[in-house]
Amino acid sequence: MYLPGYNRILSTQNVMRRCCIAVLFVVGFLTAAEVCKAYDLQALFGYSLNGQPVSALAYPDTKAVVLFFAATDCPICNRYIPEMQSLENKYAAQHVVFWYVYPNVGETIASVRRHERDFGMEQHVLLDPHHQIVDFVRASITPEVAVLVPEQSAAEQFRVLYHGRIDNRYIQIGLQRPSPTRFDLEQAIEDVLQHRPVQQADGPPVGCEIMGQP
Amino acid sequence: MMRPRTVNLLTVIALSIALSSVLLQSPHTSVHAAADQVTFNRQIAPIIYNHCSSCHHPGGAGPFSLLTYADARRWGTVIENVTQSRFMPPWLPAPGYGSFADDRRLPDEDVQLIKKWVTAGMPEGDPADAPKPPVYSTDWVLGPPDLILKVPLPMQVPPSGTDLFQNFILPVPITQTKYVRAMEIKPGAPRVVHHANIIVDRTASLRHQHPNDWQEGIPGMEVMFDSGDTFDPDSHFLFWKPDTPALIEPEGMPWRLDPGNDLVLNMHLKPTGKPETVQATVGLYFTNKPPVAHPMLLQLEDDAALDIPAGDPHFVIEDHLKLPVAVDVLGVYPHAHYLGKKLEGYAILPGGEKKWLILIPNWDIDRQSVYRYKSPIFLPKGSVIYMRYTYDNSAANIHNPNSPPIRVRAGNRSVDEMGHLWLQVLPQPIPNSDEDPRLLLEQAWMENRLSKDPNDETALYNLASVKMSESDFTFATDLYRRILTGSPEDTRTLTALGTALDKDGNWEGAESEYQKALVSDSQYADAHFDLAQLYFKHNSYAAAEQEYRSLLVEDPKDAAAHNGLGAVLLATNRIAEAQNEFQAAISFDPDSFDALYNLASIEASDKNYPQAIGLLQQALKQKNDADAHQLLGSIYIQSGRLGDALQQFKVVQELRPQDPLPHRQLAQLYDQIGQLNDAIRELNAALALEPGNADDWNNLGVLQARAGNTAAARKDFEHALTLDPQHAAARANLARL
């Protein structure tokens, strides 16, 4: 499945890489961001918790990338973190890389760090304040997930094979099953790894709206 | 797309009207225009502050704060969503089926205002309109408590998994009975603790069942408690949820805490995604005024009928209970687990009128609560209370804990089901009777349970307890025997049967049942104790002594056993040893009335009056006992404190209004201090209660003669002689007139 955002993010990436890397060596991140902004260009895939632009989501041998759209203040999102951690552990050996994407305007490196400290440190965390990734996968809710597979041709090009809810525990806010009966994300990862057609969820993600510019 | 356009149009209109109002100075149109726009500051903030912020504030139970415009904007769409679905504020009862205090249901107009505001883009509005946000403190809401209890060990709640139910045990370190007018709970981790039921464990039974690990708390959705042997029904809903941190009881209705009681916090805990530590603190606020009204909890249920086939979307259980006395219903607590769908409670009055107590159309255990009525619901004697619960055990029930659905029966686990309707009722006194109306309610309740299951051992036992307090020992004996048919070795029932037989005058039978109890469990202290008392009562002092001594081997700090042994020693004239035992009893239980009284009687006979007086005063703090007042009065007479003695005898008379003896003693005392008329009055009072007492007539004659009433004196002496022609004193007195 190809999404309209696919090409856009790809082209941004290429330009971005040149811009940021060139300046980074000289004046550091803050200036870099400013310079980028001046050129009306955005960071590659957002910023890491060190403030560095993230330029790669995948390693050469990565089979799939899972994006987990998270918010530090969303209770439903928080309740899913242990689930995400266990899936991450389960699939790490099969070269599935998990990214925690914090897209909300107003999230800061400090707030995400504090949240990570409370809920467990993650290897791959990024902030997506300009909603490049949000727009790419058309995410609207935290928690929401997407499963991407790298294109053979270029490591930084992806196809989105699944996006939506993690499982069917929540029907709506306030209506939830004691435990899920469909594990949509896990199923999608399995489908990708087994090269099967990826099943989509039969219900929407439930949680907190992703916040853009007011 | 209609809505935004309408809003834009409205904005234009508002703007033009505002403009014209400035130009034309027309305040009327200006107000009208302003009223149309929904802003945070004008309409939304008051709704949020009144209905949401009590949980949604920093440190509160809500997962995020709602105190500022920025908060409301961040959560605006969520607020719209959950108010439209009525998930928030949490309130299950349908409107119009019972009028409840602290009704949290959001009025329809407010729900619409929120929707309008979100649709309009969540405008902030004029800061001048903004109300002040409420301020919340982490201190005790009611000020420093009189007693603070803390859960012994913190509990680690894992980051994920299903909800947990844990029972935390809090021993209560008090040495005398306290009355609790309010209780406040600090859950420790407010966002984890969903709600808590607080149970007074009168016999510390849960702690005794788990001697080695009670500090960690006992898992379980519901637990059984041993409520002890005295009729003492639960009387209060002690249900805590996050937005009502302080449970304040109505005036005159504090709940009682005795030494030896435990509080048990039955907490519903929800994982949050990160490891959490829970260690609750309970603050108790006492009053020195004992309760003047005695409510009682009643339960309707039909657990035996709860056998729901897999997939059944509409399974109904019903129960009803006819009230033997008139009651005021103060509160209601409906309870089911995850399959409960529609919960109905109502009463049919004797005239046929139907009165709704509660209707919950969409049950959700996660939002369960106790509901207190705005004003009590009066149900006359003969009203019938009904419960009707509908369950959905299909896969379409989102809450179904079993996937695929399985057959579900009653039980305490969350995958089992339950159907209880609890009511807090205040029974009205029975006209022209001293009988405790709660006994009649308990009897009706237990008979109702037995009509559903004739072998319900709890119901048989409780009904027997009612019969015991009504002194119907034969009936109680029969009920205990019915329990023993099913559970022949139940030590508690064997012991209770022994007591019933003893009270019924069959002490050999009683002895045999106590012995059987001890065969079943040789360590069972109650049976040893009752047997010791039985032997003592029947003057088998050696056997009684042996039982008390064996109790003290098991538990050298058993104050009641020390006291019992002291009584045996006293009866067998080993006074010094008896004194030691009473002193030991008092050292382990300074409030032991019996030991204080017994030791006082020894001190009094040794003429150690000041010590005896001190002990009796201490004893009387525990119990307003006529014998203790009587003894104290006699000691005052011995010490020459006639005025103090008079006070004591007056109390004895009040406590024993049907007893002529206190009147007689008062008459003597008045006579001694020269208040002749008072003495005559008291003796007349004694004679009104016991007109056939020739001695009293004779004494009355003496008093009348001394008062100069010769004619009256003559009549009294003659009356004494009519009653007892051989009464020598009366004859002599008559001759002397």
Image (cartoon, rainbow, N blue to C red):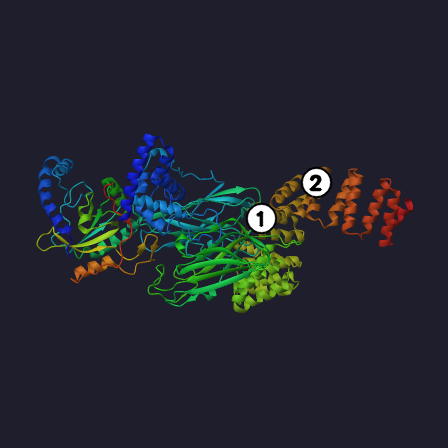
Q: Can residue A58 be seen?
A: no
Residue at the image point whose x is 79% and y is 49% from the top? B687
Residue at the image point whose x is 8% and y is 54% from the top? A153
Count of residue discs: 2
| Left or right, residue A56 beside residue B98 | left
Q: Residue furthest bottom?
A: B485
Q: Chain of mark 2?
A: B
Badge 2 vs badge 1, beta-carbon distance below 8 Å: no
Q: Residue furthest front?
A: B24
Residue identifier under label 1: B293
Which quadrant of the structure image shows residue B185?
A: top left
**Label 2: which secondary element:** helix
| Amino acid of disc 2 | Gln
| Amino acid of disc 1 | Ala
Q: Chain of mark 1?
A: B
Q: In the displayed structure, would residue A214 be above or below residue B518?
A: above
Residue identifier under label 2: B647
